[in-house]
Structures are given as C-alpha cells and as structure tokens.
Image (cartoon, helix red, strand yellow):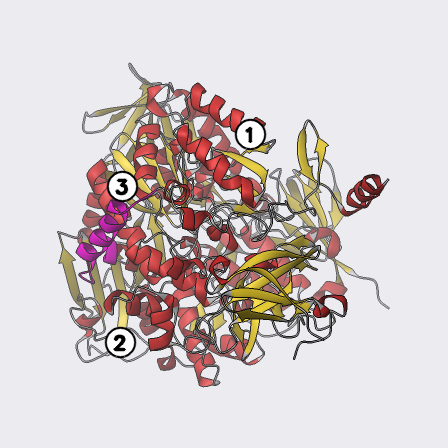
C-alpha cells in the first residue's frame, strides 16, 4: 500500500470544520493524513448564532464539533496555534509555535476579520469588535461597568451585535454610514420599516453618520464625534462595519490576491498554486467575497469533490437571507434592488402592523427575481422556491405579498416543487434527497434532520421540510393516526371543542355520545383535564374522581413506595418566617422528609394517604393552600428578588410573580405550566427556560413564551416587548387559553410551539392581532377559571364524602406494612429491598 | 366450595374507581364499575413492577375489550379477570372471586388459598 499523502487545513472555523466533516465522510479519509491548525483556543463553533451567548447559550452549546470528532477520525488538531508561514517551494507550513509540516495539499480556510475604520481613537478602551467568543467575553466584561453601547455598522452583523448589547442590558445605539439600515439587502422603504421597528424596541438608530473621531467622554468612557458636528456619548463602541478576508498568509507566500483583498480562486476553489485551495470568507471568486456561511459550505464541498477527482464547480451562490433581528423578521431574496433589466416591482406596506413586502419580478411577470420582507417573513420559503427554482408565478404575483383575508392559500405546496428543488440551502439538500430519506424510513422531523442535515443550519427551511414530510408520508399511505386512544376517534383539541360547544359536563356523557368502550388511563385523565379547564368543577366530585391520575385523586404526588409528597403553594417563592416555621412544624410532627424544590417551594415527602387530610388541615389552618404540584396545571411563578432589594433591579419581579401565580393557580392545562419573572435582564429567575417568562426592562415587561428546561431544553421565544401590566396580563390570558384549547395531551408549550404550523408568527397573529377573532372568548374563558378558583384541599377536608378514600384500607385502620423508612442525613427515606429484608427479619426476631 | 365473606358495604366503593380491602391479611384491590356488564373485580393490591401496594389507586378501563387496571406507578396494565400483565405475560397478579349481595361486598375465601388460578 502506498504511503498516505498529507492534507493540511489552516483554520478551524465553520467552513474549515464543514470541509473536515465532508472529507471524513468520503473515501478520501483513507488517502490522507489530515492536520488542521486553529488559532482560537477552541475548535469550530457557530458564529451565526453568536448573540445567543448572551441569552444563555454556552460556548459548549455553540460548538460545531461532535465529541471525539478529531480523535475518531485520526485528525491532528493544533489548537491555539496559528499557521505563521507557507513555503510553497518546500511545500511546508510552519506554525507560530514552531510546528513545521510538509503538505501535499493545503486548504486555506482562514476566514475574515472585522473591519475597523481607521478613525482616530478607534483603539481606545472599550472599543471592541464582534467575531469570536473571546470578543463576547470582552463585551460582557465591559458591560459590567458601562451603561451605553454603540454599534458602528447597521448591516446584518451590526444589528446582531446591537441585540447582544441589548441583551447585556445596555442603552443601545446603532450608527450607520449609509442612509438606511441593511443597505445591501433592503431598499429604502424596507430599511425605514426596519428602523421603526427596531427603534420601538428601544434602540436608537443614527443613519448617514460619518464618525470623525472617538475621544474621552464626559458621562461615558467614550465620545463619538460625527462629521455633521453631532456627538454621542457611549461606554462601548462595537465595530461591525463589514469584514475583510484573512489573506496575509497567502500574500506572503506569493499567491494571487485581489486588489481589495481575498485569495483568488477558480471554479474548483483552487488558488494560483494548484496544490492550494481557499474556501469561505478568505476566498475571492469572480471578484466576490461571500460573507455568508452557506456559500462557504458549498466551496468546502466543491474542494472535497475536486480532491476525489470528480467534476465540481463553484459558480457563485445565492445570497438570500432570512433572519430574526431583535425579534424582527427580515428577509431578502435575490435581486432585491431590482437591478435586472426591465424588472418590475410590487410593494405592500402596512404602517399599522409595521409590515413591508416588496416583490421584484421579470419583465414578462413570469418569474420572481427578488424580494424584501420586513416585519413578516412567513412567505420567505415559498418566495425563495419561486426564485431559485424558476417556478412560474401566479397570474397576479402581488397575491403573494398581499394579506389573505380569506382561507384561500397562495403558499407553494410541496408538490409544486421538483425533485431537484433545493429545500435547505445551508446543507444543499434537495427535495429528492428528502423524499428518498423518507422512503428509507424517516418518519419524524427529528429523524429526517439527523439523516439529511436539512434544517439544521439556519433552520429557515424547517416549515417547508415539515410540509414535504407530511405530504410524502400521506402519499405513502401513512395516515398519521391522531386519535387520542381506542375509545375516542378524536384529537384532544377535537374533544375540547366537543366539550365546549355541546356543553358536556361529564366523561360518561362524552363517552356515550362520542366514544366507545369503558375508557382507559389515556382518555380518562385527558377528558378529566378538559372538563376541569372548561367547567372548573372540583376534581374529586363523584363524576370526575375515577378520571384522575392517582396524584390528582389524592391531591398529592405519589412516590416510589406508594407514599405521597405534599407541596403547599408559596407564591413567587416569598414566605414569611412564621409560615416557614409552621411548615417546619408540620414536617416535624409527621416526620416528613423535607426538600426545597426547583420552583422555590418546599416539598414534604413520606406522607401516607391516611395522613394527608390531617397534614392539610394543619397547613390550611396556618394559612397555606394547595400548590397543585400534583396536577397538570400552573406550578410555580419563580422570581428573583427584583427592584425592591436588588441594586440592579428594574421592576418589582416578586410582586408581579405573586400576582400572576394567584391569577392562574388552579388552571388545568394539557401539561404542567411553569412561569418565572426576572427583575432585570441579568435574568436570575431563568425566565427564558419557562413556559411563560417575563423580564423587566426600562421600557416595560418583555414577554417570552414556550421555553422549557428539563429533558429537552428550549429557549423561550420573545413574544412581545415593552408591555405595561394590564397588556401583559391580557396577553398571557389569551396565550394560556389558546394553549389549553389547542395543545395535545401532555404536550408542553415548547413542543406545542415546535409543532405549530406557522410557528411564532402564527401564534402572534392569533394572540396579538386576533386573526381568528377568538381573543374575547379566550379572555372570557380565563376569567371564568379565575372566578371559580377554589383551594382543592380546603374543599376536600370540609367534605366527608371526599375524604372517604383517604385511608389505606376501606375496612381497617391499619397502615400499609410495606411502607418502611430508614434514616439518612437526619431524615427519613424509603428503605431499599435489602434493608427491607433486614427489617422484616428484625421484626420477626 | 365458595365461602363468601363480607369485606365492606357497597357504599364504601367508589364508582369507576378502586379501593383497597384487608382480607385475611392480604391486600385486595376492589374495583367497581356500576354501569358495566361485570360490575365488580378484585385483584391483588401489590404492583410487582413498582413493588408497592398501590394497584387500587390505578385508573380502570378497557384495552381491546379486556377490563384492565393501569398501575399508577409505571402504567403497566393488568387484566382484571385473569391478573395477567398485558405488557409482560409472564407476570400475573392474584385475582379473587367477588360479588355484591344485598348491598354487601363479598370475597370468596376459597379463592384466597388457591389464588393465582384465573377466575374465568
């Protein structure tokens, strides 16, 4: 066997890593000894979602490298070591640390650096850039002492950086040289709409500003002076005024570079030296530097194909983008500026809902050339397909951007796409590839994403991917059965509507009119839950008792040994010393194991069924009420201490948390609901991991929805900003009622959102814009539940009939002899099976 | 020979739900479905998977026509007539002969010693 050749990759950024991943997926892996240099202290990570670092995503979570990737594939990684020079004659690369490696093939994936305009004072303290995790750490450090942050550059990256400054709690400014924001992607009207929306969020936008000097500030660290004589005081100056290719290595070894920088490459991504390739943001193709990740990925795949000896061509890339800037949807497709000869423009502007859409179509009105969407980018997937795949437009193309006032759909169904149509542009996945993955057994979005990588990049195509999946599955005859169980041929949502519309009050009635058989442990609790959400009768009423899961039946949480735990409500986590003592006394009297929960309350374990009413009698006398820890219902509203005590607090988070918990306590829902309220953007209450999260800002309350911790964490979506309290409460009323009505059984809000067609935008249209005309009903439904609240335990202990089941034996007062505790760290715990045997032996002896 | 012993009154039962009775030292889960054809069932209260005396607190219903109770701990189903676990047929809980006579709930003492035979 011939000796392996050596392939060296300089740069382990997103594109460098994509190249390696594709390389080791191919037979080339056997041919080459692979070595890579990475000058940063960590291997490739996701720079596209960098700003999420400030909303909780860790450096680890941003990583693009699977655990053990380099070891598994025998790739030598020189981490924190920069390639310093290339000797093309000797074919060697030498690193800053002195490592010298002879190469057969060399790939330059050195990326770019942020352009810092040579303004006097650009190197003053707290003048930063936004590119690496180290840059973010420097920003976070500067934000600790600063109050004002200014981004220089109102492009795509600049606005991302502005979001990061906002997330850090700074008063944020954006300074742009051009007369509008996102000058490359948007036209004047689109830029203006974006500016309005962003200013509404509290960011001050300065366009047409030329910074002439940065100097000492009077109130802040820095002062920016503009050519027009105006000034701006700011602590942080964050440069995000474009990128420049990292071509210094290529220059010094004599490779051809462009006049304004960039390593010149041909259609195979070869540089002027046939042994050396360049890919990503350092490469100059046809006079263009591509500052997006998707073209870089395409170049990476082109090089892999070329190394294999196959025929591959990089022939430019589509620069269409869709992104969410500070919660504002922005998209730009193709020829957004209508530069094509004869191009015609349609535009739609809605000043009230702050939506702007523009279509650029060919002279004959047959094909879409470009588009701009601001404020509502839900049409992006459809429009992009029209544009990329030359699909003929409908007769009146403006129908594609005009709001639909009827049910008529103008979206492009998945069947209209050809097999070669590209669905995912990040990973170049075609509809054909997706269909064959489905034929090979992918039945869920998760499987499909894992198999094809589609929708795992920017995620912009996931709605389209889902519609292709649904369409293909139904074609293959997999009618997805959504019946709740064998007793009802309905979904939970159907059952909810039947109960509501036909005013059905009992399970027996519903089973008799719409079901069959006796019911089971799936439909009974689900219907019990629906009846409670809708009519809010006590769950231990005779008609409802048999429907409840054991936790609900005993108004307590069953543990592994058949004992129960007791959780009284402690609203907002606020508790007086006297109440805490009362709780301690009950725990002590009944010898319960006590533990603080994650939801800021106290859990008392080890209660036998017969003890529960006695325990609750004492708790209620002390002023406690049921915490509904046993129910599919509102659990807790966690809070930080807020402005009352905290030096940084912006508003009274505890007060709001208590008000919300008291408002929604007792609400039965498809699954448990958790809230949190943070008093400032430092977010100590972790509100963005909750079903409903609220964060205080200078401009009012920001509302986040559909977050989750637990097994499958999901970062909550920003739903509305700068709300006053009445609007906040009204919005949450509607949101919760809509969730209660439409979710599947045991579906948390996070999964409900993931599965919602139209996603966040649709939810906003229902809850905020009242698209379905439902909001009044939703508010009434919530008001009814609030008005009929009762402490389930208080009602239970006052009713002999309800207490009858709170004993282990119906015919004896003996306790269950199978419940055995041992002591650990000064408290009880259930005995394990060995201890139990020992205990029994001792008893006999 | 069946020997029927009173364990409780029918008023002690909960419709479409279960209670636990102590019967000759054994824990017996009794389920009452007043609207069904067969109105009352008795099985062991001990859940062999969860290893706790909890089956009387499970939800009852039917799966594919078989009357079942579902364990409140890990949700296995047991056939109320045969005691066989639907998820693992090698596991069986005791079943007892039961009837309601003149408002009194009665268990058959003879089904206790030779338990484990299906009451079918």
Label 2 resides on the chain identified as A
CA distance separating discs 3 and 1: 43 Å
**x and y, in percent, of residue A543 in the image:** 38, 61
Quickly name the residue at label 2.
A367
Q: Report helix, strand or loop for mark 3.
A: strand
Q: Position of residue A231 (x, y in %)?
A: 23, 24
Report the residue at 45% width, 43% height from top: A689
The relative height of residue A86 versus residue A578 in the rendered view (above or below) is below
At x 64% / y 57%, what residue is drawn? A20
The quadrant of the image that shows the C terminus of chain A is top right
Give the distance between the C-alpha atoms of the residues marked 2 and 1, in whole angstroms.
73 Å
SS label for mark 2: loop
Looking at the picture, does residue A336 appear above or below residue A606? below
On whether disc 2 and disc 3 are found on a single subunit, the reply is yes
Task: Tell me the residue that label 3 is attached to.
Answer: A721
Q: Same subunit under labels 2 and 1? A: yes
Q: Residue at x 58, y 53 (%)?
A: A811
**Chain for disc number 3:** A
Residue tagged by mark 1?
A587
Residue A232 falls left or right of residue A2: left
Between label 2 and label 1, give the one nearer the viewer. 1
Q: Nearer the viewer, mark 3 or mark 1?
A: 1
């Amino acid at each position: 066997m011939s000796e392996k050749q050596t392939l060296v990759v300089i740069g382990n950024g997103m594109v460098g890593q994509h190249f390696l991943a594709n390389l080791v997926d191919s037979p080339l892996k056997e041919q080459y000894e692979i070595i890579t240099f990475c000058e940063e202290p960590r291997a490739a990570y996701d720079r596209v979602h960098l700003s999420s670092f400030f909303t909780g995503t860790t450096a680890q979570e941003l990583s693009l490298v699977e655990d053990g990737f380099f070891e598994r594939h025998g790739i030598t990684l020189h981490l924190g070591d920069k390639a310093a020079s290339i000797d093309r004659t000797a074919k060697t690369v030498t690193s800053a640390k002195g490592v010298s490696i002879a190469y057969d093939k060399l790939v330059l994936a050195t990326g770019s650096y942020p352009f810092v305009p040579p303004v006097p004072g650009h190197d003053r303290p707290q003048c930063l850039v936004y590119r690496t995790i180290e840059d973010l750490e420097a920003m976070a450090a500067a934000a600790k002492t600063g109050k004002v942050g200014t981004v220089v550059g109102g492009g795509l990256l600049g606005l991302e950086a502005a979001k990061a400054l906002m997330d850090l709690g700074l008063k944020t400014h954006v300074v742009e040289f051009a007369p509008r924001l996102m000058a490359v992607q948007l036209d004047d009207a689109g830029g203006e709409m974006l500016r309005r929306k962003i200013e509404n969020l509290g960011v001050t936008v300065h366009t047409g500003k030329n910074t002439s000097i940065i100097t000492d500030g009077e109130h802040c660290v820095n002062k920016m002076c503009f050519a027009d004589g105006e000034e701006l005081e700011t602590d942080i100056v964050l440069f995000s005024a474009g990128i420049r290719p990292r071509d210094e290595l290529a220059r010094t070894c004599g490779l051809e570079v462009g006049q304004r920088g960039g390593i010149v490459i041909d259609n195979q991504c070869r540089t002027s030296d046939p042994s050396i390739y360049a890919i990503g943001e350092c490469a100059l193709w046809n006079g263009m530097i591509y500052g997006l990740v998707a073209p870089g990925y395409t170049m990476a795949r082109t090089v892999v194909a070329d190394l294999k000896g196959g025929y591959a061509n990089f022939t430019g890339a589509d620069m269409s983008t869709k992104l969410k800037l500070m919660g504002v949807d922005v998209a730009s497709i193709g020829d957004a500026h209508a530069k094509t000869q004869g191009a015609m423009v349609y535009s739609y502007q809605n000043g009230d809902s702050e939506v702007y859409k523009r279509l650029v179509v060919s002279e004959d009105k047959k094909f879409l050339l470009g588009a701009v969407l601001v404020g509502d980018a839900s049409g992006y997937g459809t429009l992009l397909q029209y544009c990329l795949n030359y699909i003929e437009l409908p007769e009146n193309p403006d129908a594609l951007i005009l709001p639909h006032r009827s049910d008529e759909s103008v979206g492009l169904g998945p069947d209209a796409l050809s097999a070669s149509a590209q669905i995912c542009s990040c990973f170049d996945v075609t509809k054909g590839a997706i269909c064959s993955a489905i034929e090979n057994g992918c039945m869920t979005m998760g499987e499909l994403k894992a198999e094809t990588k589609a929708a795992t990049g920017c995620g912009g195509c996931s709605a389209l991917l889902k519609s292709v999946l649904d369409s293909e599955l139904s074609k293959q005859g997999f009618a997805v059965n959504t019946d709740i169980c064998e007793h009802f041929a309905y979904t939970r949502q159907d059952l909810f509507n039947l109960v509501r519309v036909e005013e059905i009050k009992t399970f027996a009635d519903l089973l008799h009119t719409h079901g069959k058989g006796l019911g089971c442990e799936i439909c009974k609790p689900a219907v019990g839950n629906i009846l409670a959400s809708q009519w809010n009768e006590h769950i231990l009423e005779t008609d409802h008792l048999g429907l409840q899961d054991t936790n609900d039946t005993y108004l307590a949480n069953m543990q592994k040994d058949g004992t129960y735990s007791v959780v009284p409500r402690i609203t907002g986590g606020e508790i007086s010393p006297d109440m805490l003592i009362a709780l301690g006394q009950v725990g002590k009297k009944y010898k319960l194991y006590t533990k603080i929960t994650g939801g800021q309350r106290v859990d008392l374990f080890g209660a036998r069924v017969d003890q529960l009413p006695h325990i609750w009698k004492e708790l209620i006398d002390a002023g406690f009420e049921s915490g509904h820890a046993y129910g599919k219902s509102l659990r807790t509203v966690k809070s930080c201490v807020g402005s009352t005590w905290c030096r940084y607090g912006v508003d009274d988070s505890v007060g709001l948390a208590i008000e919300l918990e008291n408002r929604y306590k007792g609400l039965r829902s498809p699954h448990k609901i958790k809230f949190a309220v943070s008093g400032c953007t430092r977010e100590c209450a972790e509100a963005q991991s909750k079903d409903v999260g609220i964060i205080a800002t200078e401009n009012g309350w920001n509302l986040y929805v559909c977050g989750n911790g637990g097994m499958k964490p999901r970062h909550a979506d920003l739903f509305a900003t700068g709300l006053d309290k009445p609007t906040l409460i009204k919005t949450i009323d509607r949101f919760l009622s809509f969730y209660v009505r439409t979710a599947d059984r045991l579906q948390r809000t996070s999964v409900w959102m993931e599965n919602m067609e139209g996603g966040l935008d649709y939810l906003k249209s229902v809850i905020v814009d009242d698209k379905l005309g439902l909001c009044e009903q939703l508010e009434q439904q919530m008001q009814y539940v609030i008005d009929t609240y009762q402490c389930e335990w208080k009602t239970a202990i006052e009713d002999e009939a309800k207490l009858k089941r709170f004993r282990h034996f119906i015919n004896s007062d003996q306790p269950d002899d199978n419940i055995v505790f041992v002591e650990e760290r000064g408290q009880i715990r259930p005995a394990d099976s060995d201890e139990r045997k020992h205990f029994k032996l001792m008893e006999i002896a | 020979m069946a020997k029927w012993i009173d364990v409780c009154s029918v008023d002690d039962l909960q419709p479409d739900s279960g209670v636990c009775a102590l019967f000759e030292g054994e824990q017996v889960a009794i389920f009452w479905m007043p609207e069904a054809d067969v109105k009352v069932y008795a099985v062991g209260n001990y859940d062999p998977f969860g290893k706790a005396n909890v089956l009387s607190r499970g939800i009852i219903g039917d799966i594919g026509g078989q009357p079942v109770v579902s364990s409140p701990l890990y949700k296995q189903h047991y056939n109320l007539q045969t005691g066989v676990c639907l998820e693992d047929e090698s596991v069986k809980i005791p079943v007892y002969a039961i009837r309601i006579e003149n408002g009194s709930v009665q268990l058959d003492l003879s089904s206790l010693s030779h338990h484990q035979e299906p009451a079918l």
